[in-house]
Image (cartoon, rainbow, N blue to C red):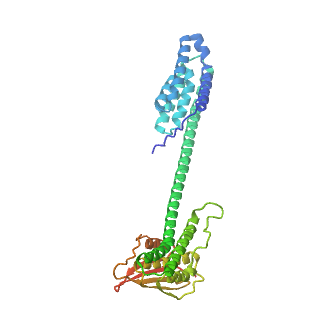
Amino acid sequence: MQPVDFQPPLSLWSHTWRYAVVLIISATAWSSYAPWQWDHYRAWFFVDLGLGLACMVLVYWRRRFPVTVAVLTALASGISATAAGPSTLALVSLSTRRRRNEIIPVAVLAFCSILLINELSPGSTNGRIVAYTALASLIGVTIGWGLYIGSRRELLATLRDRADRAESEQSRRVEQARTAERGRIAREMHDVLAHRISLVSMHAGALTFRADLTPEEIRNTAGVIQENSHQALTELREVLGVLREGPGDAAPELPQPSAHDIPALVSESREAGMKVDFVENSDLDGLPDNIGRTLYRIVQEGLTNARKHAPDTLVTIAITGSPGDGVTATISNPLRIGDSRLKTPDSGLGLIGLGERSVLSGGRLSHHITPDRVFVLHAWLPWPV
């Protein structure tokens, strides 16, 4: 598997200091050859300088054509000492790719080129000594420096990619959490408002269809509608309290309902005209708050469904349980024979939301219709010891 070539963009300063180093290398290398060339082969002096300048320009495209530029500058350094700087930069750039099949041939070519220019320039004794004693080590250092730069670039690119992926994953988790929270709030709003609105709808329907009500009965019914509307707004504020971000506003202003509020819920439904038989065979003092709140919502939804679909039937509520065994709630009511004149819209979300809430609490929820046309809502919730 070939290493990935990571080539970050270069700024103006990066280009500037690289060319400055190239000029220093070229000037140092040419200083050993220039006097001899000027004295013996003046044409070679100008050819050396021209090839060096051409390689200075050519090395600009070392990233786009790494092998081609490295080969051409290495060949030019065989007769041009000023091409040593561009050849070195091209070899370093090629080595950052960390591809053995590219680096080894170019390194051998560069070695041979330096040997050639030393043989062609008898006057460059000092250059020949340096080339023969330190040539292999200099080329090795050049290649090693390029390999280090390439590894470092790959490491930084990998870390940057991991950081980007971690940030993207975190954003995705935040979005999922936000979506889940919106769903939870929607279920909470349904549980809270459906109960109150069904009471308001039932009493408003009575005012619509009953023409024989006395003024006192109309006032009492209107008072019930007003009270339940006010309660609906209050409970809606409780639920939306979780959306507040100010200090102290993260929690609802009023206590959340619990299992201890179930008797009051039943009494409220009885006062609204429902027939409710409530049997509580367990002491719910030790029930955890989250389980108690789920139990309250289950009973509330059972009463709401009965009020919607069978308002004049007897609703039976039975709650039993103990620590370790869990708490069981059963809400049942006969189905109404015929259609009620008071129709409320069916959302179909109440039982689905309760099912999800029960599962999240570690329990289960089911509902069915018996052969004798009785709707039964059954729930079991855990009760730790």
* Viewer-side residue, 302 vs 274: 274
**Residue 358 in sight from this viewpoint:** no
**Residue 22 in sight from this viewpoint:** yes
* Viewer-side residue, 296 vs 118: 296
Q: Residue at x 54, y 27 (%)?
A: 87
- The residue at the far front in this view is 215
* Viewer-side residue, 220 vs 96: 220
- The residue at the far right in this view is 247
Q: In this view, does 66 lie above or below 42?
A: below
Q: How many marks?
A: 0
Q: Is residue 189 above or below residue 207?
A: above
Q: Tell whether 151 sits left or right of 349.
A: right
Residue 231 position in % (x across, y down): 55, 73
Residue 41 position in % (x across, y down): 55, 11
Q: Quadrant of the N terminus?
A: top left
Residue 242 position in % (x across, y down): 58, 65
Q: In which quarter of the image is the C terminus?
A: bottom right
* Viewer-side residue, 296 vs 380: 296
Residue 201 position in % (x across, y down): 45, 74
Q: Residue at x 58, y 78 (%)?
A: 288
Q: Is residue 79 above or below residue 18?
A: above
